[in-house]
Image (cartoon, rainbow, N blue to C red):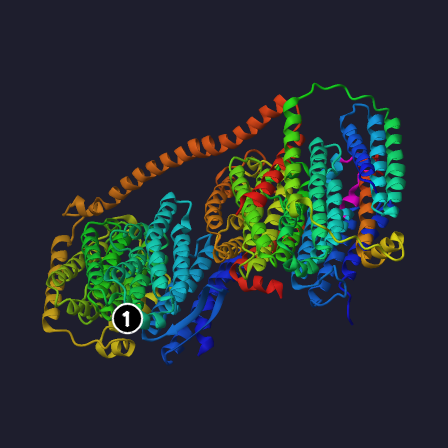
Amino acid sequence: MAPIVFWIFVILMLGFGLSVIVSRNPVTSALSLVVSFIALAALYVSLGAFFIGVIQILVYAGAVMVLFLFIIMLLDLRVEIRKRMNLPAVSGGTIVIILFIKILFDVCYSFNGGHAEFPAVSVATHGDVWTIGTMIFRYYNLPLQIVGTLILVASIGVVILSKRELK
Amino acid sequence: MDSVAWIILFTPLVSALVITLFTQPYRKLSSYLSVAAVGISFLFSLIVFFSPDGSAGFTWIDLGIFQVRIGYLIDGLTRLMLLVVSGVGLLIHIYSIGYMQDDAGRSRYFGALSLFMFSMLGIVLADNFIMMFMSWELVGVSSYLLIGHWFFRSSAADAANKAFLVNRIGDFGFMLGILLVWSATGTVAFTELTHKWSSLALGSTFMTVAPLLVFCGAVGKSAQFPLHVWLPDAMEGPTPVSALIHAATMVAAGVFMLARTFFLFEHSPLALGIILWIGLITSLLAAFMATQQSDIKRVLAYSTLSQLGLMVAAVGLAAPGAGIFHLFTHASFKALLFLGAGSVIHSLHHEQNIWHMGGLQRRMPITFWTFLVGTLALIACPPFSGFWSKDGILAASQGNFPAFCAIALVTFLTAFYMARLFVVAFLGHSRTEHAEHAHESPRVMTVPLILLAIPATIAGLPPIASLFWRVSGHEGSPATAIIVSLVAFVAGVLAGFALYRSRDKDPLNIPLFEYRFYIDQLYDQLVKWTQDLLAGICGFVDRWIIDGGVVRGLSGMTWGTGFALRFLQIGNLQAYAFLFGLGVVVLLYFILFGVP
Amino acid sequence: MSFPPALLELLVLCLGLALLLVESFTEKQDRTLLAYIGMVGLGVIFLILQLLPPGPTGMASYVFDPVAIFFKKFVVLTTIIVLIMSVDYATTIQRFVPGISSQAGLGEFFAIPILTCAGMMWMASAIDFILIFVSLELVTISFYVLVAFMRRNASSLEAGVKYLILSAFSTGFFAYGAAWIFGVTGNTNLVRIQQVLPALGAENYSAILFGALLVLVGLGFKIAAAPFQFWVPDVYQGAPTPITAFLSVGSKAVGFIVLLRVVQAFQSLPPVGDKVVAALIILAAATLIYGNLAALPQTNLKRLLAYSSIGHAGYLLMAVAGISARDSGQAVVIYLAAYLLMTLLSFLILIIVSNYADGDEIVNFNGLSQRSPLLAFGLLVAMMSLAGVPFTAGFLGKFLVFKVAYESQQFVLLALGIITVGCGFYYYLKVVRAMYWQSAASNGATIPVSGLSFATIVLLVLFTFLLGIFPQMATGLLR
């Protein structure tokens, strides 16, 4: 893939990601998140991970976001009341983030100044759906089951914490 | 053989546990259990007495570099002490059934008594310093419990605290001593130490300091000057406790320990000299103090101090055998005297002032005669047991003239104050109503008196003593020692009789002696000063460092953060997240790029 | 008969699910019955664990070694005691959970800890980052629910939100770190990682270290190590007390087993392993200082215990930092065993007393020795053990930790440890002083104690002493 396409999607993803945080309107935030997810999916596809790209769109951009939008509509959330911009808080957070990114860059540069050659990702002979399926259902079956439990606990928790009157 | 020693040691512990956990409400049962336990220990001690030497043990705590062994070592010394401790203990347990008849806390009392027996036997049987030290501490705890048995009397509670605290001072030195010895030799087992210590090539300072620190333990437990102040106060406990713990056994533990670890001392003449003079000073001071006390138990307490001083002095004279021999005879006659005093106190409705007694020889004949036996033994009247053992110490001191004179003086004073006590309390006419209506104590109390009177009379006689005394043969004493001792004894008794016969109040008035050389006052003042100082420091630390520095620092931090947060108008959570993130970044940066 | 050890978690899971089902299909039943069923069920699991020998499991990501068995027993026991506490705490829960019937929500309050327990048991066996991650998340998510359980209590809700957000934060670090490690080594399995690491070139070192440190951050949050401990005081104080106990014992313990396994894996590459140890030393020092100093001015027992739990994490980190010493793992295990006994004991008594006195300030414990000698004695033992008085389990734990620090030559930590133990005496004795030297305020009546709690207190006290007096018992824990 041409580097220019990569950079376009990266900028889209990060720009709309930023917009999620910055925008005051919840609907705008949610829709920005959709765009950010789609750009991320495009990056997956560009890496040859078609299945994950599709899932990213289906699950996150599709199901999760629709749920978000529904909730926002149902709760009738208004535009957040404008708070005064508190510079120290923002700058504090920004400094931490910048420092973290700085460290990240330093670590990346330790790979031969960022020019190290990595071995190519082995492409499975059966396509990535087969690879992922084998991975999840054969090698990582137990974690999958645990995720099931996790979701069960989470849903019970949601009911407990949000139902108006418990029986 | 193996199990016998364990039975001796652990039966009282089982009894203490059972009493504390289960039989608290059943006072009678508790007392019988306790007596049965010490009875078993006594029987098995008899078996051990006629068995050969031996030792065994197991590792209790094994944490690699640190091991605690529980083991016993049976030799002549152990055999004798086992017999003394369990024998005297048994009689005093029986006596206690009568003496503590009306006490509501009887279960507690017997539980503590059993605990004491366990720990005391632990000291006697121990084959290493660690086990001895643990038992040593346990003895301190049970002594604390028993002195404070009547804790609702503030004097008893204070006395218990005093005993405990003063003993801590000595025990601290003891612990340091053990640590020094351990670090130098790498072992705490007595048999191993015996070999290693003599071949130790360390400076003479170390060879003096380490044993002297160990000696600190004995100074505390055996109430030697300058830590002697707790013992007279300890008489606040029930009289049988005074007899068992603060006369016959526990206070003798220090002397026993010195004899057991004598190999540490014998290479250091300086250490021996210090021990000798601490013993003699204690002995002399206590004898002077005893001449002016009017509480029957206090007189006995000071005489105990004085005799303990003699035993320690014997160790200092490099004659631990003589010290242990005196310990042996002293255990029986001093227990007898205390129990006799207890019998008098019991029948006089807890009257302890000798000037409120008098004329008891007809009303309490058994107590009278047995007390007389005890007195004669204590003042070294031939052929009672005390004569032989005191003579041994006197003989040992022959090469050292000042020590010899001091011991002779103590002998004289002992005879004097005991004659005074005996004359005032038992002879003459009754001075109070209680004394007039005194009656003989129940048989459960008088039988132990009679039984104790037997060894008090005969235990010193050479043929009998040699039966018991196999540690170092008791040679015949030189004539000078015998003569001096006899002269001192006769002079003391005569002076006592002359001064105190048919008196109603003390003709002598020596405040210095009566107020015990003002040592307690001095200590009180010292304690008060140090307390004030400590309280000042604590208050300072509390107010300025903990409250001011740490707390205010931390609350200042919280406050500062709060201020910053208010300023930034962000909630706590964001602050936490920010600090968290900052922590991550700093840690990452420091470790990735900071640490070489 | 060979019993596949991996079945154990499934049994626990089924137990939890069964309780939920029973809860939803019965109406009038007394809900505490569910708690009792749960305790018995977990008791059976404990017995099975006691009988199962360690051995191969046939799974690459799941081990059943002595350490795993110890921690499984540990969490099962913790859960049982948490259930016992929850029964005592039920009245408070009822007060703060809105519901039609008076027992609303109780069933879930008893069932969810059992599911959490299953997650913790998986963590004890997990040696693969993926399995570690999902089981860690199972534990964490169930704690979100449990911490915020008392909906009508603002501080409980607030605690829940704080825990949720900060925990998500730390989970992010953990996952990111694991991803870096996977990226460099091509493995998520700790055993494989350990084998692969020595062959890596020097250019990879800072990347591995970066990943390892991020994982350390994620785990540091779970075990409440400074500077990732900010959530602890607020969350501990706001959460329902049994859950606080569960958090401070169970969650911390499984955090430590994962930490031990991860740190051990990185020791195969000394340039990285040494720096990981350096990070642990910094964390341990910061945790010791913060936990013990901040505990000094506390007047609320629950908050005091929160700070003390931070302090104890510091001692445990000391032992982990001494990984080069032979007995490091053993010291952690024994310290945790002691920690379980004394912490659960204090929380159990705290629940009983605060239920009665309606408050968990230290002042509420004034004169407890006259009102309820047993409770006072129990708390006395717990405090002595927490402070590290000889012949209690806590002393043994501290002794071993200091020994490990000495053997691995962490003298700075050793000195800090000894100084902070002194601080510990100050604030633990504050509680003892209130119980034994202060006179009771108003209601001088004896505090009622249920039979089960009574028995638990007695057992905990007994084991606190047994472990202190017979340390061999503890060294046998890993066999």
**Could you tell whether C131 is left or right of B503 in the image?**
right
Q: State yes or no: residue C24 in magenta.
A: no
Q: Main secondary structure of the magenta part?
A: loop
Q: Secondary structure at mark 1?
A: helix
Residue A53, how many percent across, how many down? 86, 43
Amino acid, disc 1: Ser
The quadrant of the picture occupied by the N terminus of chain B is bottom left
Foreground residue among C242 and B295: C242
Chain of the residue under the numbered disc 1 shown in the image: B
Q: How many marks?
A: 1
Q: State yes or no: residue C106 in magenta.
A: yes
Q: Which residue is mark 1?
A: B198
Residue B9, how many percent across, how many down? 44, 68
Q: Is residue C87 visible?
A: no
Foreground residue among C81 and B76: C81
Quadrant housing residue B258: bottom left
Q: Residue at x 22, y 77 (%)?
A: B462
Q: Residue at x 37, y 81 (%)?
A: B52
Q: Is residue C66 visible?
A: yes
Residue B57, how many percent across, how many down? 45, 72
Magenta region: which residues?
C97-110
Foreground residue among C310 and B501: C310
**Could you tell whether B319 is left or right of C230 in the image?**
left
Relative to residue A86, is residue A112 depicted above or below? below
